[in-house]
Amino acid sequence: MNLSHLQENNRRWAANRIAEDPEFFKRLTQQQNPEYLWIGCADSRVPANEIVDLLPGELFVHRNVANVVVHTDLNCLSVLQYAVDVLKVKHIIVCGHYGCGGVIAAHQNLRLGLINNWLRHIQDVAEKHRSHLDSLASEEERGSRLCELNVVEQVVNVSQTTVVESAWDRGQDLTVHGWIYNLADGIVRDLSMSMNADKKIGPMWQKAVEMLHHREPV
Ligand code: CO
Protein backbone atom coordinates (compact mmCIF):
# COMPACT_ATOMS: atom_id res chain seq x y z
CA MET A 1 0.00 0.00 0.00
CA ASN A 2 1.21 3.43 -0.94
CA LEU A 3 1.88 5.71 2.03
CA SER A 4 2.61 8.81 -0.03
CA HIS A 5 -0.17 10.69 1.80
CA LEU A 6 1.78 10.27 5.05
CA GLN A 7 4.96 11.51 3.42
CA GLU A 8 3.06 14.51 2.08
CA ASN A 9 1.74 15.17 5.59
CA ASN A 10 5.29 14.94 6.87
CA ARG A 11 6.69 17.46 4.38
CA ARG A 12 3.90 19.91 5.09
CA TRP A 13 4.44 19.49 8.85
CA ALA A 14 8.20 20.08 8.56
CA ALA A 15 7.66 23.12 6.35
CA ASN A 16 5.18 24.59 8.83
CA ARG A 17 7.62 24.09 11.70
CA ILE A 18 10.38 25.85 9.77
CA ALA A 19 8.03 28.67 8.81
CA GLU A 20 7.32 29.25 12.49
CA ASP A 21 10.90 28.81 13.67
CA PRO A 22 13.66 28.54 11.03
CA GLU A 23 16.17 27.15 13.56
CA PHE A 24 13.77 24.53 14.98
CA PHE A 25 15.26 21.33 13.52
CA LYS A 26 18.81 22.62 13.59
CA ARG A 27 18.49 23.20 17.33
CA LEU A 28 17.05 19.74 17.94
CA THR A 29 19.98 18.05 16.21
CA GLN A 30 22.28 19.49 18.90
CA GLN A 31 20.57 17.92 21.90
CA GLN A 32 17.29 16.98 23.55
CA ASN A 33 16.48 18.51 26.89
CA PRO A 34 13.05 17.30 27.99
CA GLU A 35 11.85 18.02 31.51
CA TYR A 36 9.23 15.31 31.46
CA LEU A 37 8.96 11.57 30.95
CA TRP A 38 5.51 10.43 29.85
CA ILE A 39 4.48 6.82 30.50
CA GLY A 40 1.17 6.30 28.74
CA CYS A 41 -1.05 3.89 26.88
CA ALA A 42 -0.32 2.91 23.26
CA ASP A 43 -3.94 3.82 22.38
CA SER A 44 -4.01 5.98 19.22
CA ARG A 45 -6.49 8.35 20.88
CA VAL A 46 -4.01 9.33 23.59
CA PRO A 47 -1.12 11.05 21.77
CA ALA A 48 1.31 12.24 24.46
CA ASN A 49 2.78 15.42 22.94
CA GLU A 50 -0.52 16.68 21.59
CA ILE A 51 -2.45 16.29 24.84
CA VAL A 52 -0.03 18.49 26.76
CA ASP A 53 0.75 20.62 23.70
CA LEU A 54 4.51 20.08 23.76
CA LEU A 55 6.90 20.22 20.82
CA PRO A 56 9.46 17.62 19.73
CA GLY A 57 12.31 17.73 22.23
CA GLU A 58 10.11 18.60 25.20
CA LEU A 59 8.67 15.23 26.20
CA PHE A 60 10.42 11.85 26.55
CA VAL A 61 7.85 9.13 25.90
CA HIS A 62 7.25 5.49 26.71
CA ARG A 63 3.94 3.92 25.73
CA ASN A 64 2.65 0.38 26.05
CA VAL A 65 -0.73 -1.30 26.31
CA ALA A 66 -2.52 0.10 29.39
CA ASN A 67 0.49 2.09 30.71
CA VAL A 68 1.83 -0.71 32.85
CA VAL A 69 5.20 -0.47 34.64
CA VAL A 70 6.50 -3.96 35.35
CA HIS A 71 9.67 -4.35 37.42
CA THR A 72 11.19 -6.85 34.98
CA ASP A 73 10.34 -4.94 31.78
CA LEU A 74 13.78 -4.04 30.47
CA ASN A 75 12.27 -1.82 27.78
CA CYS A 76 10.38 0.42 30.20
CA LEU A 77 13.20 0.37 32.77
CA SER A 78 15.74 1.42 30.12
CA VAL A 79 13.59 4.38 29.12
CA LEU A 80 13.18 5.28 32.79
CA GLN A 81 16.89 4.97 33.53
CA TYR A 82 17.95 7.05 30.53
CA ALA A 83 15.34 9.71 31.30
CA VAL A 84 16.30 9.99 34.98
CA ASP A 85 20.06 9.40 34.94
CA VAL A 86 21.09 10.95 31.62
CA LEU A 87 18.38 13.43 30.61
CA LYS A 88 17.62 14.30 34.24
CA VAL A 89 13.90 14.82 33.73
CA LYS A 90 12.22 16.50 36.69
CA HIS A 91 8.81 14.89 36.30
CA ILE A 92 7.55 11.44 35.40
CA ILE A 93 3.90 11.41 34.37
CA VAL A 94 2.03 8.10 34.39
CA CYS A 95 -1.05 8.86 32.32
CA GLY A 96 -3.88 6.35 31.99
CA HIS A 97 -7.17 6.96 30.25
CA TYR A 98 -10.82 6.07 30.68
CA GLY A 99 -12.16 3.51 28.24
CA CYS A 100 -8.76 1.81 28.05
CA GLY A 101 -9.17 -1.35 25.94
CA GLY A 102 -6.39 -3.11 27.83
CA VAL A 103 -7.89 -2.39 31.24
CA ILE A 104 -11.38 -3.36 30.09
CA ALA A 105 -10.13 -6.61 28.51
CA ALA A 106 -8.37 -7.45 31.78
CA HIS A 107 -11.47 -6.56 33.78
CA GLN A 108 -13.80 -8.63 31.61
CA ASN A 109 -11.31 -11.47 31.29
CA LEU A 110 -11.53 -11.38 27.48
CA ARG A 111 -9.41 -13.97 25.66
CA LEU A 112 -7.25 -12.03 23.18
CA GLY A 113 -4.10 -14.16 22.99
CA LEU A 114 -0.55 -13.28 23.98
CA ILE A 115 -1.59 -9.91 25.34
CA ASN A 116 -3.52 -11.62 28.16
CA ASN A 117 -0.16 -12.35 29.80
CA TRP A 118 0.60 -8.63 29.84
CA LEU A 119 -2.88 -7.79 31.10
CA ARG A 120 -2.42 -10.19 34.05
CA HIS A 121 -0.74 -7.26 35.80
CA ILE A 122 -3.99 -5.30 35.62
CA GLN A 123 -5.95 -8.27 36.87
CA ASP A 124 -3.61 -8.23 39.88
CA VAL A 125 -4.61 -4.58 40.43
CA ALA A 126 -8.28 -5.57 40.17
CA GLU A 127 -7.81 -8.37 42.71
CA LYS A 128 -6.09 -5.98 45.12
CA HIS A 129 -9.12 -3.65 44.95
CA ARG A 130 -11.78 -6.33 44.52
CA SER A 131 -14.09 -5.34 47.39
CA HIS A 132 -14.25 -1.70 46.32
CA LEU A 133 -14.79 -2.57 42.65
CA ASP A 134 -17.57 -5.01 43.59
CA SER A 135 -19.28 -2.25 45.59
CA LEU A 136 -19.78 -0.10 42.48
CA ALA A 137 -23.15 -0.07 40.76
CA SER A 138 -22.30 -0.79 37.13
CA GLU A 139 -19.79 -2.55 34.93
CA GLU A 140 -18.94 0.80 33.35
CA GLU A 141 -18.13 2.36 36.73
CA ARG A 142 -16.00 -0.63 37.67
CA GLY A 143 -14.07 -0.30 34.41
CA SER A 144 -13.45 3.43 34.90
CA ARG A 145 -12.40 2.95 38.50
CA LEU A 146 -9.98 0.22 37.48
CA CYS A 147 -8.44 2.62 34.92
CA GLU A 148 -7.87 5.09 37.79
CA LEU A 149 -6.58 2.48 40.25
CA ASN A 150 -4.22 1.13 37.60
CA VAL A 151 -2.58 4.57 37.38
CA VAL A 152 -2.19 4.78 41.17
CA GLU A 153 -0.56 1.33 41.27
CA GLN A 154 1.78 2.14 38.35
CA VAL A 155 2.94 5.31 40.14
CA VAL A 156 3.84 3.03 43.07
CA ASN A 157 5.72 0.72 40.69
CA VAL A 158 7.69 3.62 39.15
CA SER A 159 8.50 4.96 42.62
CA GLN A 160 9.83 1.57 43.73
CA THR A 161 12.24 1.04 40.84
CA THR A 162 15.97 1.10 41.64
CA VAL A 163 16.27 4.00 39.16
CA VAL A 164 13.87 6.31 41.00
CA GLU A 165 14.89 5.20 44.51
CA SER A 166 18.56 5.87 43.69
CA ALA A 167 17.72 9.29 42.22
CA TRP A 168 15.88 10.25 45.41
CA ASP A 169 18.72 8.87 47.57
CA ARG A 170 21.20 11.18 45.88
CA GLY A 171 18.87 14.17 46.23
CA GLN A 172 17.82 14.52 42.59
CA ASP A 173 14.76 16.69 42.00
CA LEU A 174 12.21 14.21 40.65
CA THR A 175 8.44 13.88 41.08
CA VAL A 176 6.22 11.05 39.86
CA HIS A 177 2.63 12.02 38.97
CA GLY A 178 -0.52 9.97 38.31
CA TRP A 179 -2.91 11.38 35.72
CA ILE A 180 -5.94 10.13 33.86
CA TYR A 181 -7.12 11.36 30.48
CA ASN A 182 -10.75 11.54 29.46
CA LEU A 183 -11.31 10.63 25.81
CA ALA A 184 -14.72 12.32 25.97
CA ASP A 185 -13.50 15.85 26.75
CA GLY A 186 -9.74 15.81 26.10
CA ILE A 187 -9.03 16.79 29.71
CA VAL A 188 -6.39 15.30 31.99
CA ARG A 189 -7.11 14.93 35.70
CA ASP A 190 -4.56 14.60 38.47
CA LEU A 191 -5.21 11.59 40.74
CA SER A 192 -3.43 13.12 43.79
CA MET A 193 -0.71 10.51 43.69
CA SER A 194 2.39 12.67 43.37
CA MET A 195 5.48 11.03 44.79
CA ASN A 196 8.81 12.65 45.56
CA ALA A 197 11.75 11.96 47.88
CA ASP A 198 9.96 13.51 50.89
CA LYS A 199 6.83 11.37 50.67
CA LYS A 200 6.17 7.87 51.92
CA ILE A 201 4.58 5.57 49.37
CA GLY A 202 2.21 3.81 51.84
CA PRO A 203 0.39 6.92 53.13
CA MET A 204 0.29 8.54 49.66
CA TRP A 205 -1.21 5.36 48.19
CA GLN A 206 -3.78 5.20 51.02
CA LYS A 207 -4.80 8.81 50.49
CA ALA A 208 -5.10 8.47 46.72
CA VAL A 209 -7.14 5.26 46.98
CA GLU A 210 -9.48 6.75 49.61
CA MET A 211 -9.97 9.83 47.47
CA LEU A 212 -10.98 7.59 44.58
CA HIS A 213 -13.39 5.66 46.80
CA HIS A 214 -15.27 8.90 47.50
CA ARG A 215 -15.15 10.17 43.96
CA GLU A 216 -18.11 10.15 41.64
CA PRO A 217 -17.51 7.55 38.94
CA VAL A 218 -16.78 8.98 35.48
CO1 CO B 1 -5.42 2.24 26.84
Image: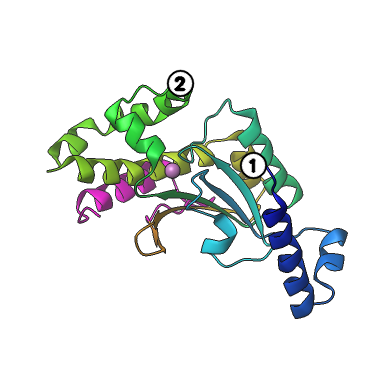
Q: Is residue 78 left or right of residue 151?
A: right
Quick check: can you spot residue 199? yes
Residue 6 lies in the magenta-colored region: no
* As drawn, 44 above or below 157: below
User: Which part of the image, by quadrant, shows the C terminus?
Assistant: bottom left
Q: Amino acid at mark 1?
A: Leu
| The disc label shown at residue 80, or none | 1
Q: Where residue 207 appears, x then y in whole percent?
A: 31, 50
Q: Nearer the viewer, residue 209 or 113?
A: 113
| Label drawn at residue 5 | none
Look at the numbered disc 1 and give the secondary structure of its residue: helix
Q: Which is more foreground, mark 1 or mark 2?
A: 2
Pointer 2 residue: 117
Which quadrant of the frame does ligand 1 lie within?
Answer: top left
Q: Amino acid at mark 2?
A: Asn
Position of 214 with respect to 73 (left or right) is: left
Magenta span of residues: 191-218
Which residue occupies the extreme bottom position in the image?
Answer: 20
Q: Is residue 100 above or below residue 190?
A: above
Residue 125 seen in this snapshot = no
Determine whether the residue tagged by mark 2 lies in a helix, strand or loop: helix
